[in-house]
Amino acid sequence: MSTVLELPSKRPSPMAEVLDRLCGAPRLKPFSAPATAVLGELSRRILAEPDLARRPETAALAFWLRPANLAVLAKDVPPAPRNAMRVPAGLALHFAPANVDSMFVYSWAFSLLAGNRNLLRLSSRRGEMAERLLGLIPKALEMAPEVAQGTAFIQFDHDDAITAAASARCDLRIIWGGNASVAAVRAVPLSPHANEIVFADRLSLTLLSAQAVLALSDTELTALAGRMFNDIYSFDQMACSSARLLVWLGGTTEADDAEQRLSTAMRAQCSQRRYALEPATALAKYSLACRASMDLPVRKVEAAAMDWVVIDLGKGMPDTARMEVCGGGLLYGCRVDSLDEIVPGVGRNMQTLSHFGIALEQLEALASELAGRGIDRMVPVGEALAFGPIWDGYNLLAQMGRLVVVR
């Protein structure tokens, strides 16, 4: 019988027994008191750990899990259509990503708030932050035995037999990961009555008005650079919503001047935050910049220091399929005279557009012109990693439940 490691204890357990326990757990209503109690307790425990409370990623998670914020989320759930009511999907099977340590908590929390029982498969490549969060969850689960019985975090190597056993009994499968990982899981049959939500590789960009950046005072520029640092360097730029492309709106001269000013501010942030660039990442960035200079129409490379590197591809949106990435503060740059020039370069793989100095009317016109071509989020600089109930075009709380007609 196939076995898995239950986390955080790493106790070996037969997969069939784990599934039996979850399927026999009490059924909860959406936004039940036990669910919100557990998540609120996890928030409290994160904030009680000084180092976690200081980290932007975990502090944001704790803030999001607060009971007051969960109450706001409950109000944002789309009302059920006439003659219908919302109910849980049932058992949700999650494949958590390895690149963003806190994402498994968000995935679990949304599904739990929808009323589901949850089985989460975590990668063996998860980082130190994920381990810390896992260590806090069992104490939070003590707040509600019914939630604990319906929750399991597991680890197993890629094993189609285990994936198939879980997929056959789940009502909802949620896959986070790269395109190859998603394809591998999707090749395993899913129960005919189950639904599936997929979050594959995505590319994000930052759009800046050159004129607006040049108009900033030194203090305002420092604040903007601080917000960009959080967007880009959290999780070492490996989150899908961290920008890999920097787009300047404006003429050549003002864009160059604004970029020089921003680059100076970003390097100051790296120094002030004591960003430690791993030697392997520095080498990868240098090698990538050299290859790009040979293979792409590179106008210049902004790399006075390796912690902030911008490969300038000149005017117009680039072919993103040719943009090799490595994280650690490496971006490609380009310039446009108007937002209309962005549209042809947008593909379905583009997720988040973080912006500064762009009017709301311009953003709405851009979204209308894109008409679903790509870009699922347009948020101010500093909010790229702010997780919300609408992600990659899905309303998660609606997608993770079901509707029952009652007439």
Image (cartoon, grey):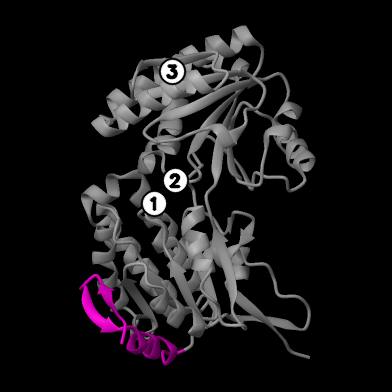
Regarding residue 311, the answer to whether it shows in the image is no
Q: Position of residue 142 (x, y in %)?
A: 28, 79
The magenta stretch spans residue 3: yes
- Quadrant location, the C terminus: bottom right
Residue on which disc 3 sits: 263
395 left or right of 31 in image: right
Mark with earlier residue (3, 2): 2
Q: Position of residue 137 (x, y in %)?
A: 29, 69
At 62% across and 83% down in the image, what residue appears? 193
Regarding residue 277, the answer to whether it shows in the image is yes
First to last magenta residue range? 1-26
Q: Position of residue 346 (x, y in %)?
A: 67, 38
Is 398 situated above or below 89?
Answer: above
Circle 1 Cα neighbour tier, 10 Å, few/some/many (<14 / 14–19 / ≥20) = many
Marks 1/2 in contact by CB < 8 Å: the verdict is: yes
- Quadrant location, the N terminus: bottom left
Quadrant of the rendered image containing residue 373: top right
Quadrant of the rendered image containing residue 42: bottom left
Quadrant of the rendered image containing residue 189: bottom right
51 left or right of 160 in image: left
Residue on which disc 2 sits: 239
Q: Position of residue 190 (x, y in %)?
A: 55, 78
At 55% across and 41% down in the image, what residue appears? 203
Image mark for residue 100: 1
Is 312 situated above or below 393?
Answer: above
At 34% across and 30% down in the image, what residue appears? 284
Residue nearest the viewer, comparing 130 with 381: 130
At 55% across and 22% down in the image, what residue appears? 296
Looking at the rendered structure, the kind of residue marked 2 is: Ala
Residue nearest the viewer, comparing 161 with 259: 161
